[in-house]
Image: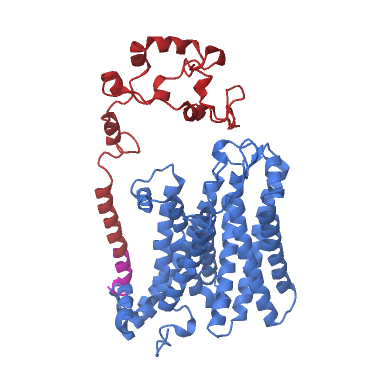
Amino acid sequence: MSGVEGYMYPNEITLYWSILIVLYPYITGLVAGAFILASLERIFHVEAVKPTYRLALLTALSFLLVAPLPLQFHLGHPERSFEMYFTPHDTSAMAMFGYVYLWYLMAVLVFEIWLDYRRDIVLRSQRRKGMLRWIYKIMTLGSSNISVRSLHIDERVGWVVTLIGIPSAFLLHGYVGFIFGSVKANPWWSSPMMPVVFIFSAMVSGIACVMVLYMAVTRLRRKTIDMQCVDTIARYLFYTFIIDFSLEMLDLAHRVYEADESFRSLDFMVHTKLFFSQIVLQIYVGTLVPLLLLAITQVTKLPEIVRKRLYAIAGGLTLIGIFAMRWNVVIGGQLFSKSFLGYTTYKMALATREGLLMSIALTLLPLGILWVLVKLLPPWPEENGTKAAGMSI
Amino acid sequence: MRVFKDAGHLFRFAGLFLVAFLLFLLVRGRVVPKSFGEYGHYRGNAIRDIAALPVRFAGHQACATCHADVEEVKQKGKHAGVNCEACHGPLAKHTDDPGTLTPPKLDTAALCVRCHAASAARPRNFPQIAEDHFGGVACETCHQPHSPAVDAGGAQ
């Protein structure tokens, strides 16, 4: 049979979880990571990253809005997804995830963004004309109180929301890892390390994403990149990446040492079908190279232009590496037989509901949403409500 | 109460949540069937709906009542445990009134491979047919379906 080597059970030959299911943990990871970066400034008072605070929040929201779409397209019948909310079953991990998602979207992200932008929104609702004026008016919820005291209350409440948001972000992405880690019939997934590895890889991808976005957007706006900010983000990316890589290596070492009945089969798969995506893309190109580049920036004094380029390359490679990690988890976990005697092949479609073009569209969609959000709620300090006499957005 | 005045917008946001929650409850009350959860985590009326469906299968014994000769052949062969309607399809209407529905003649070349197509997932000692087995010749030429061993005689 084409694409099948050795012995496969009939229900293992076709992969049921496609590239869209790879995209789903990748996108939620970017959300969680971007939010954790935002919390650095708010909770841990890392003032240097302040220029990216609002951008990180808007990035998290843009990706979070798209996060359920890969699942919707994969499953079809989007109208049935509401049944998960109306009649949730307490043994369904996905049903509980629906509530975690809603909580994170509404009670954390939207609320925090609203609190942070409220002053700008009120000012814009008074100065803008036409349709935009009405959009901002609706966003004020009818309250134009931006007294010092009310803004102070916003600041305090926002701090609490961020504080609650950190475990919520961990919960959001840890849950994705939990769903895979609890599939006990699949030795490639079944590991209590899975949620922890997912959280740290999420932080790595989210921080890298905001760093690259900040540099790219600032360049597009023909403004100066705040190097102290990017240096600090890169430093946190480096630290988080080291922890993430250590955890993944710990998981690998444990699997090698334990060498249970699945090990020979999985080891063979890593050296054949997953060689390019796991060894080349994930470990070398997506982890060791960016770690090396970031390490160079940490131990040597490099000119600004060199640092910028190294950060851009390291950030881009990190995003590719984390995507490869999601690919290897989701696709890799379906390539081998439960009999450990055979392997199948994933044939990605091109222009179908679950094909490559759909995946590219869903990856680009958050960037489109972010563009709209940035136009509506500029995250740049020089364009906030107080200084926006001309209100040019 | 200055605090309440300056925190008024927070109550508005909370109000938004409350409205959304009430809307959720309202929609939930409308769309979730009343019998949901009656017996378990499903629509209770589903059981009654299924029970009300017309009976389509007559059962092995109903067939044997009239077709004792076929039943006798079948009991001697490897297909003794295969229910008649597994191959011939649901025939409750035929048993109710044989004149209203005559079971169609089956295409054994398509029917037999449903169970006997070669597959690595089937037990080794289970008879399996390779795709090129007698290239398109109907199985019943050599195998009498009710007692399929070759020495039991085919259709001829």
Q: Is residue A272 above or below residue A45?
A: above
Q: Main secondary structure of the magenta part?
A: helix
For residue B134, which quarter of the picture?
Answer: top right
On screen, residue A296 versus residue A215, left or right, reads: right
Specify whether residue A345 is painted magenta.
Answer: no
| Drawing shade for chain B | red
On screen, residue A217 versus residue A116, left or right, reads: right
Q: Is residue A359 above or below residue B87?
A: below
Q: Identify the magenta region.
A: B1-15
Residue at the front extreme, as displayed: B156
For residue A211, which quarter of the picture?
Answer: bottom right
Residue at the bottom extreme, as displayed: A390
Residue appearing at x 58%, y 77% in the figure: A215
Question: In this view of the protein, which residue sits in the foreground, A21 or A108?
Answer: A21
| Drawing shade for chain A | blue
On screen, residue B54 versus residue A219, left or right, reads: left
Residue A309 position in % (x across, y down) = 67, 77
Q: Is residue A246 among the parts visible in the rendering? A: no
Residue A39 position in % (x across, y down) = 52, 68
Residue A245 position in % (x across, y down) = 67, 58
Question: In this view of the protein, which residue sits in the foreground, A311 or A57?
Answer: A311
Indicate the colouring scheme.
by chain
- Quarter of the image where the N terminus of chain A is located: top right
Residue A69 position in % (x across, y down) = 44, 58
Residue appearing at x 71%, y 40% in the figure: A264
On screen, residue B146 versus residue A257, left or right, reads: left
Q: Is residue B19 among the parts visible in the rendering? A: yes
Residue appearing at x 54%, y 47% in the figure: A180
Total count of labels: 0
